[in-house]
Every structure is written in structure tokens, then in C-alpha cells.
Amino acid sequence: MRRLEHAFADSQRETALVAYLTAGYPSLDETVDLVDAACAAGADVIELGAPFSDPLGDGPVIQATTQQALRAGVTVAATLDLVAKVRATGNDVPIMLMGYCNPFLRYGLPKLFADAASAGADGFIVPDLPATESTDWLVEAERHNLGQVFFAAPGSSPERLRRTARQSRGFLYCLADNGVTGVRDRLADGLDAYLARVRAAATTPVAVGFGISRPEHVAALRGKVDGVIVGSALLKRIGAATTAQQRIAETTALISELKEACR
Amino acid sequence: MTGWFGGYGGQFVAETLVAPLEELEAAYQKAQASEEFLTELDDLLNRFVGRPTPLTRLRRLGVEANGCTLWLKREDLTHTGAHKINNAIGQALLARRIGKQRIIAETGAGQHGVAVAAACAHLQLDATIYMGRVDAERQAPNVQRMELLGAEVRLVDNGTATLKDAINEAIRDWIAHPDSTHYLLGSVVGPHPFPTIVRGFQSVIGREARQQFLDSVGNLPDAVVACVGGGSNSVGMFSAFLDDPVRLIGVQAAGEGLGPGGRHAAPLLYGEPGVLQGTRTYLLQDDDGQILLTHSVAPGLDYPGVGPEHSYFKDTGRVEYRTASDDQALATFALLSRAEGIIPALESAHAVAGGLELAEELPHGSNILVNLSGRGDKDLVSALAAIRERDGADR
């Protein structure tokens, strides 16, 4: 939690940038390099996706990357190893593990949190785990002092928002829009009013994701939230590049550009 | 409504779906207490669906095996040809009350898709149906029926392009349109409150069958058999007999073979508990928690999970679960047609195969009630081709 708190500490002056990468896309070795490139270019938090066969919250871009990782045999254990490898390079940026319930449950929650803590991860983001089903997870998160991030949705009732925000550890993931992950041309209508409602309910930092792909999106959110999350836009650029060197260059370019808009 | 059946069920969904699920639960509870809703539903079940469906006593099968009598609950005789319409018309009526004009649904065998398309046409709602491309190919007549009924059919290429993948796409659609759209889920699977709502609308099968049996025979059957994919026809049937001294038997698809590495769809026999598509239940999964590919000749049974209430019944032992293979189902498909003049859906043929197996085990003179959940018209092309292929291999 220390690294995570630090990442959002200065968010009034400068919005924190969260960069999503899929573990093992395009390969496990390359993910280490891409994490380093993203951090060097200004990413304040890394969200590292552990692949799942049925990623219900993801659109085509992230689905394609997790499918490729699965075909290469990337598991939860391999994702945890990857975190340890990143830490071995001296990187101290917070790393949140994103993944769906089933692979994590299969690994076993007590072992998952213990291994995540010792690998140097900072917490979990589980899109099919609402706060109302999370008792066992929160016990482990508290025991290991790790984050456990829950979501706010545009349709969340005020009561629901308060409960979710109170239970969320590290930050609250604010879904900018209905729908699955994916690049969108513009920010959702009514986003400002919704963000104000979320801010009023939340005591933890608030990070906004889904559809954020361009510097102007980030600039429009500056001062209204503590963090912005970019995923599909980054993986799309990485996917379009043809060599490892180009993939690093694309990561550096997009993250620098977005980070610039955070300031 | 807690949404839990012992340790199974729950609501493991994206936050975006929490509000529409809560809205649905409240609307269902209100509707169940509304005289007006229940009267309208009854009227639709009688005059549109064609209920009550008859109970047919088989003349040869079972009797010839071991002097046992097999009784079929004829859900195949409902409008659109399967039990799916009971739930489709109920939920469509509910959606209209909530004020949702757009309906989405998944379909495996196409029976749920056709039922939804018909219910939506009848109640003037807009239907979009997701169907795996593989299923669409093996159930082509049902695609044509859905389109004729005015539904838009969206083919799904992800994964194995079967039922699970169609559900994934339907859920993604719902996440994108939670305010305007009702997801008309077709089985007792998915997040709370679906397993409870679908059971509620399918329980008419068991209520009717139990009374018809008492009226015809004077006492209860010795055993009740139904096939279990997601598990809605079986839960609907079993729900009336849970407190009776009656053996309940669910038949899952053994496909081409059981055990490790086998191509089947029998999570209740060979799965482990996990979370998929919003619910905690038995799943076919690997050591990393990835969902395994499944196979059954019956598209409606070709699913790696099962309704959470079945997982609970398995653990408590109230229902016994067995399997029937592709070969058994195909043989029974042909046998029931020739011996009794009834062409069963391949899904339902699994239940009949289970009933025939039971007839060999039970004492002489036992009564076995089998839910014939659907008719086999949709399966003619693929079943006849599979039977020909097997006959060829035998020669």
C-alpha cells in the first residue's frame, strides 16, 4: 500500500497515470521491457493483466492480447514471476495485478496474496468481483497490506457508491462509461457530473478508465480525478508495431504524450 | 432472495451490471406478488405457449426392458418446441413491465433463441440473439426461424463458437447497454437473480407433471429424470419433487468420452467449483482456472458450467447425476422415434437414455417420469448425418 499511496500523493498537482499491460503479451520477456519503458516514460502505476479464457469485461483489443498470452501458456504463477522479474530490475513503481476471479480462486486466495506480496505486487483489480462478494479477499488484502480495488459505474446508486468506495483499498476504479474496455473517440456524456458524485462518495483516490486514449481526454480530466488509466490504446499501438524495438518506442511515445497532459 | 444455494451462486459481475440486476430482482419480486402479472402470464402460458403439456405413457420402451413404465412430460409440444418458452415469455413480460424495449439473449441449440424471438414478436419487443457460429451451422433451421420471427441473429466466433461464447457476448452487450436492455438469460445460470427467476418460470413443468402423475397413477413416480446442461428444464421439473420420497436424476453429456482429456460436458461429475459468468458453481477448468473446451452432440448441453442450484444438489446428494454419451443420445433419438412415434431433441434424448438405463436397475413395475424438454426437428440434419457416419464406421 505504501508504493500505491505514494503514487497518488501528489495528484492535485499532477494526475497519476496508470498503464495497463497484459502479462505475456507479446511475450513474458518483452513484458518486462514494456513495463520498464512505460515507467521510464512517466507511468505512475502499472496494471498487469493475468490472462483468462473468458474476459467478460474486455473488448476485442485486450481479448486478443490475453488470448495470445494464454496460447503461450501464461498462468497466474507466471504473472507473479513477472512481477518479481520487474522488481529485480530495480523498478519501484506500484504494480496492480488485474485478472478475473476464477484463475485467482483456483490458485487459492491465501497463497495468492502471500505470493503476490513476496513477488512485490501492490494489490489486485478484479473486474468480476464486486465489493459485496469480496469478504475473503479483503481479509487477505489487509493481512498482507495490499490494495484491493473496486469499481464505480455510471449507474451506481449513491448508496452503492459509498459502500464500494469505503471498501476499496488503494484507489477506486471509476468506469468512465458503460461497456467493455476499448478505445473510444470521446469521453462519455455527463462524465463531469458523475465524477463529482464519485468524488463526493470517495475518501480513497479515484482513477478513471475505459475509453481514455488521447492527451485531450487526459487534459479534460485533470484536477477532477487522481488518476487516469490507459489500456486498449496502449496495446493497440504495441500490437501495430512489428519489432520489439518499435514496441518499446510506441510505448514510450504514447505514455510520454499522455503524461504530458497530466501535468 | 439471497442468491446463494449453499456455497454456490452469488453475483460475480462487473459493477456496471449491479444496478440492472438489482432492478430486475425488485421487479421480479413485485411481479410475483402482482395478481395482474400472474393472470397475464397464466393467460399467455395457456393461450400462446399451449400449456398444460400432456403426460405421455410410453407403450414399449421400459415395459419391454424390465416391466417398468416410462412417462414423458411433453415440453416438446409447447409452442416453439421446447421448455425454453416458459421462461422466455415470463421474462419478456417482466421486461415490458420494467419498461425495457430491447431484449438480448444467447442461444445454444437455438431453442431459447427461437422462444425469445417468438415471445418478443408476440409482445412487440426488439430481440437480438447471440449464437455461436458452430451452433448456428448445426442448428440452421432455428436461425431461419429466429430471423423469420423478426429477431436479429449475431453470430459469435470467439472460443469454441458455442453456448458459453454466446453468453459472453450477450453479457458484453448488456454491460454496454444496461439501462435500455434486458438480458433474457435462458437457463438457471449466471448471476443472481437469474438462477432464481428462471427456476421460478420453469417450475410450471414440475407442478403440472406432479399433479398429472397423481391424477393418472394415483401416487408419485419412483424416479424423475431430466437432462442437465445449464439445468433449467431439470430444475423446473425437480423443484416440485424436492420434498417427496422420489429419486431425482440429472443426466449430463458424456460427449465422446469422460475422464481427464475426454471431450464431454459433465462438470457435475468431472468439474471443480469456480466462478464463471457471474456465478460460483462446478466448472470444467484446468489447473490454472482456465475454462476448458467442451463437447456434446447436443448443443444445449455443450457448456462448461451448470446452474448453481445443481452444484448444491450434487453436494447435498438430493439429485444423482449421471451421463449419457453422444452415441447413447443418437441411438435413443432414433429409438424413441421408431418405437413410440416421438422425435426428441438430442438434449432430451440424453434424459430418455438415462430413463431407459434406470428402467434396467429399478424393480419390476417401477414408474419413471422423464422430462422430454424439446422436440428434435432442429436436429434432423446433424443427427441423421452423425448416425450415418457411425453406421458407416461399424461396417
Image (cartoon, coloured by chain):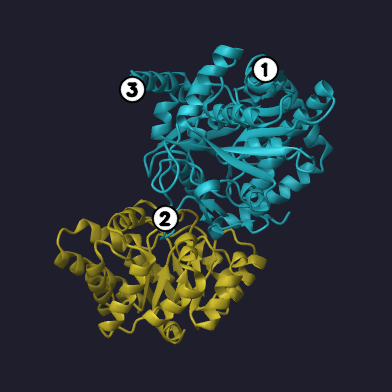
Chain colours: A yellow, B cyan
Q: Amino acid at mark 2?
A: Asp
Instruction: State whether residue B279 is above or below residue A84.
Output: above
Residue bearing mark 2: B286
Please tell me whether mark 2 or mark 1 is closer to you in this view.
Answer: 1
Tell me where residue B8 sits by quadrant. Answer: bottom right
Q: Residue at x 59, y 58 (%)?
A: A155
Return the x and y of residue A58 as percentages of the image width and height: 41, 55
Residue bearing mark 3: B393
Instruction: State whether residue B12 is above or below residue A116.
Output: above
Return the chain for callout 3: B
Residue bearing mark 1: B58
Say whether marks 2 and 1 touch (CB < 8 Å): no
Say whether marks 3 and 2 touch (CB < 8 Å): no
Q: In this rendered view, identify the residue nearer to me: B86 or B287.
A: B287
CA gap between label 3 and label 1 equals 31 Å
Q: Is residue B334 left or right of residue A42?
A: right
Both labels 3 and 2 in a single chain? yes
Mark 1 Cα shell of 10 Å, populated few (<14), some (14-19), many (≥20): some
Q: Secondary structure at mark 3?
A: helix
Q: Secondary structure at mark 2?
A: loop
Q: Quadrant of the C terminus of chain A?
A: bottom left
Q: Is residue B44 left or right of residue B18?
A: right
Q: Residue at x 25, y 76 (%)?
A: A36
Q: Amino acid at mark 1?
A: Leu
